[in-house]
Amino acid sequence: MPRQAAPAPTRALTIVHVGHFPFGLRPGFQHGVAVKLSNGLIRNGHLVLNFSDRDIARARAPFGSRKLGVTPANAALLEFCRHHRPDVLLLGHADVILPPTIARIREALPAIRVAQWNVDPLFEPDNVRRIAGKFAVVDATFLSTAGAPLDALRAGGRRVAFLPNPADASIERGRADLAEHPGHDLFYACGHPSRPLRLICGQEWDMEAFIRAILARLPRLRPCLGGLLGRPHLTGAAYQAALEDCAIGLNVSRRPDHFLYSSDRIAQLAGNGLVVLMERATGYDTVFSDAEMAFFASFDELIGQIELLTADPAARRAMATAGRARYLALFNERAVAARLLDILFDRLAPEALPWTG
């Protein structure tokens, strides 16, 4: 897609950010990537106008139906952009917004740059379909997976870049690394423990069975669980309070074999000062050292890591502090937002990784 000349790096931009923001009667997730990216862009000096496509769709439809509100929500975004004349249209999981609407916005504002970001896994075909559906109308795409799956989407010269899960110290406010004796040893929350099964160290697990297996080996462990073993789900302030009172955070995503893919849980754990406990196969051991995160390659090694860290609070705190410091240095909301704009405006190659330059 032809591009206009990029504005000078020091220019303050007007950015319309379309995504799932905690507005309206469905308040959403205060730890969400959309909130953090908008915070980072604002703190870097830009004007950000958040547009919650799902809430607009519900508000403009009979019976609050998001599906029935698609057409009016698209019309609202077109009018919103015509009114505010943004330099950038940023789309985060904005499935309500259709490609023809983006094309019409580009016609109305020929100099606009358009980017989409997505932090869902690339091993989900439907997610790849949704991402690819906007390739023709965006200038750049940002994804939370690196390696071969991301490279494949660059076919034909598309600008596709790795998006780290940002941490924001105004959201991840906890300092569990400073607590010698937090109330819980291990944190794990899961929306759907058995749908689908998680692939961990080569074996598929129902996460309730996985947690029970850990507790069978470590009967004195004090877990903090959300949505498992009869515990209620944790959201909002309750979720944040739980993170602040835990020593170690188990970071298990759907599968570990897509390079650097993790749910945004990794930022929530590291940013709040928990030791991040995750599988080595994710590739995060190429970014963080064994002094900064606790990696495992087998169930026995996972148990061993928990035993070592719970038996030695000083070692656990040192690892958590080091991991938190490196995560926030590399992947804070301002750095991630700045890198996104640098790639979007051709000041940085999309292949560049943020910890290698």
Image: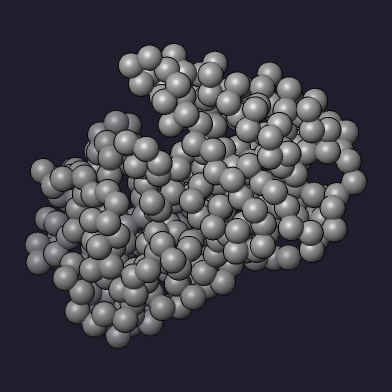
Image point 41% across, 62% down: which residue? 171
The answer to whether residue 107 is above or below residue 35 is above
The answer to whether residue 18 is above or below residue 78 is below
Q: Is residue 76 visible?
A: yes
- Horizontal side, residue 148 vs residue 217: left or right: right
Residue 292 x/y as whole percent: 45, 73
Q: Quadrant of the N terminus?
A: top right
Residue 279 x/y as whole percent: 41, 55
Image point 10% across, 43% down: which residue? 230
- Tally the marks: 0
**Closer to the camera in the image, 189 or 88:** 88
- Horizontal side, residue 203 vs residue 60: left or right: left
Q: Residue furthest front?
A: 83
Image point 18% across, 67% down: which residue? 184
Q: Is residue 331 visible?
A: no
Residue 42 quadrant: bottom right
Residue 193 x/y as whole percent: 25, 38
- Horizontal side, residue 252 vs residue 89: left or right: left
The answer to whether residue 320 is above or below residue 351 is below
**Closer to the camera in the image, 197 or 297:** 197
**Closer to the camera in the image, 95 or 304:** 95
Residue 105 x/y as whole percent: 72, 28
Residue 348 quadrant: bottom right
